[in-house]
Amino acid sequence: MEARTEDDRVVVGGDARQRFYDARGYGYPLEGNEIALAWVEAAHLLLRGDIDAVDGRDFEAFLRDGAGDVEGGDRAALTFLVYLDLRERGFYLSPAREGWVSDPDPTVDFVVYPRGKGPEDEAVAYEVRVVGERESIAASALGECTLAIVDEESEVTYFRTDRPEWDGATTFTPEEPVDATLLADRALCWTPPAPLHASAFYGQPLGKREEGVDVLQLSLVETAQLVAAGALSVDGGYDAVVQRGRAVEGERFDRRLQVYAALRERGVVPKTGFKFGADFRTYADVESVDDLGHSERLVRVVPRAFAFDPRDLALDVRLAHGVRKQLIVAWPEDGDVAWASIERLTP
Amino acid sequence: MEARTEDDRVVVGGDARQRFYDARGYGYPLEGNEIALAWVEAAHLLLRGDIDAVDGRDFEAFLRDGAGDVEGGDRAALTFLVYLDLRERGFYLSPAREGWVSDPDPTVDFVVYPRGKGPEDEAVAYEVRVVGERESIAASALGECTLAIVDEESEVTYFRTDRPEWDGATTFTPEEPVDATLLADRALCWTPPAPLHASAFYGQPLGKREEGVDVLQLSLVETAQLVAAGALSVDGGYDAVVQRGRAVEGERFDRRLQVYAALRERGVVPKTGFKFGADFRTYADVESVDDLGHSERLVRVVPRAFAFDPRDLALDVRLAHGVRKQLIVAWPEDGDVAWASIERLTP
């Protein structure tokens, strides 16, 4: 069976409508018995031998013409690999383009139907955005789509992104401010009220295995938030802590402090995520540090206009999955904090 | 008991030699019964209440004087926290300084003795370098030391670094070069010789779940290395592949290709490490792709003068540990590749 190119579609007639559209969800119907195919759909039918040629070109020539150009940023090979992968997983899917779907989302490449469903049904399983390993992913684009990342060996990894809620129950009501000493990049509180660490899980005891020592070490973000809450007093006040924070980590300190404070406001306890390579690990509900469960989430704080290298995102997601925590990306937005969750998905 | 500062040492007399040096490995002996203490040793004895004051200062004042200055890059608080942590783990240890140890290594902060041993014995368990979470770690400094990284909440994480060997047994002997087509950022080989994928584990079949399709997808590093080895032929030859590689990932392509080729030379199979956020995962001995074991190592390729953010290193090490692989860092050095292994250590 031969097909031909018309504008940016491939058109095929004969029994194509019945064989390809009705039975297997390729393309969309035109006048008579013809159907329109997207480039990826035509490539897939060529690969399978279901059509023989497009404008006389076989699969190799068709692919070379469509997916050979790097300078023009041609994404044809990437989208084809994702299309192929989803087809092989048993899904029917359509390009998110006018004609194939109604009211297409321009940030989405494919609309994937639930298994057993096709373009004539209403249901949608995934809205998939295709990303090459060497492209970047804007943090602000996370939150409401499925990413399909194609690595250099043409394997496809899927990430589901969403907008998480926070629902914490850990509170700390300060009485009189207690004194703390600022050191180079941390602070020491000499006479901490017991609940500060024991139930609100601030800080870490100094000399934790030593008898009779009751000094609490605080990180600079903890210190700044406690000073702002009226729980702690240091020489120079809040400004001195922030100045110290900026001296040791630049404007990253302000971002992290903003996210730290936003989590505490929501009753969530953020502790350092260093061992997981994250900014914070979080506990929604600490009753006592002696009876601490596992932290539930890992939070990575990024700037407002940050774009991820897909490989770094893959690293974060894989690690979080391995330690059974949910990965959250956080960034400052409109005076508040925006959050996106990301997890691996097997379609 | 009172101590006094003399130059950059703290000196203490009375029964200090017997109580602190002989019995518990602090300091080194001076004339008579006096001993010299380093700042961290004096701070630890103050914290424990074993000495009462240094020049009249108690623990708080002593710590504030020594560890309060950020502008001067004072590392006193960091080294103290590591000293304290190792003491609490039951080790005796000495500052790597003239007087305390003979022939001290200037890149090392502490010499740690095996449990039950002290400065008078010959044995050394670890040579520890102290790193703050906000400092950076030169890749070239990895390979023969133990890193003690202090995070913002004063937890200490230890990494052992070493020089790994490679010992692979996977070979591929090309016959005639076969044709491949360069696409935007990968290549397709239309008639691959069976062993290319089946036993040498190059590439990935296109349409791997489709019947009757026998096209092999190759990454650009695989393609370049195969063209150089005389196994593959593409339009424009080796230079065209390298040019394409540089177009899609800049000079990172050259580094990755150099490491890829060095691994293949050693009989090791590198495949993409994308899912683990690494450059490559490696298999030392592939006999058949149908009977493939788990990959053993993850390789991260960095530039010659690269310096790690400790948090990124923590992320890599933690991930590798979670998937039971060894983390290797590789960088170009003197026309060859330098390798360092890094793993978490619990002293």
Image: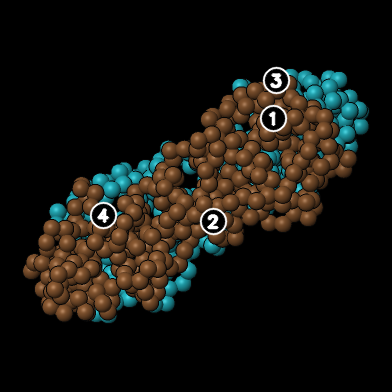
Chain colours: A brown, B cyan
Q: Residue at x 41, y 45 (%)?
A: A138
Question: Could you tell me the amino acid type at mark 3?
Answer: Gly
Of the numbered discs 4 and 1, the one sitting upstream in the chain is 4
* Disc nearest the viewer among 4 and 1: 1
Direction from residue A335 to residue A286 in the image, left or right: right
Q: Residue at x 60, y 53 (%)?
A: A297
Direction from residue A344 to residue A52 in the image, left or right: left
Of the numbered discs 2 and 4, the one sitting upstream in the chain is 4
Q: Quadrant of residue A43?
A: bottom left
Q: Are marks 3 and 2 in contact (CB under 8 Å)?
A: no
Question: Could you tell me the amino acid type at mark 4?
Answer: Arg
Q: How many neighbours does mark 1 have within 10 angstroms: few (below 14), some (14-19), or many (20 or more)?
A: some
Q: Nearer the viewer, residue B104 or B173?
A: B173
Rounded to the nearest angstrom, the CA distance separating label 1 from label 2 is 33 Å
Marking on residue A319: 2
Mark 4 — residue? A75
Of the numbered discs 4 and 3, the one sitting upstream in the chain is 4
Mark 3 — residue? A236
Mark 1 — residue? A228
Rounded to the nearest angstrom, the CA distance separating label 3 from label 2 is 40 Å
Q: Are marks 1 and 2 in contact (CB under 8 Å)?
A: no
Instruction: Give the structural element (helix, strand or loop) at label 4.
Output: loop
Instruction: Give the structural element (helix, strand or loop) at label 1.
Output: helix
Rounded to the nearest angstrom, the CA distance separating label 3 from label 1 is 12 Å
Q: Chain of mark 4?
A: A
| Residue at far left of view | A56
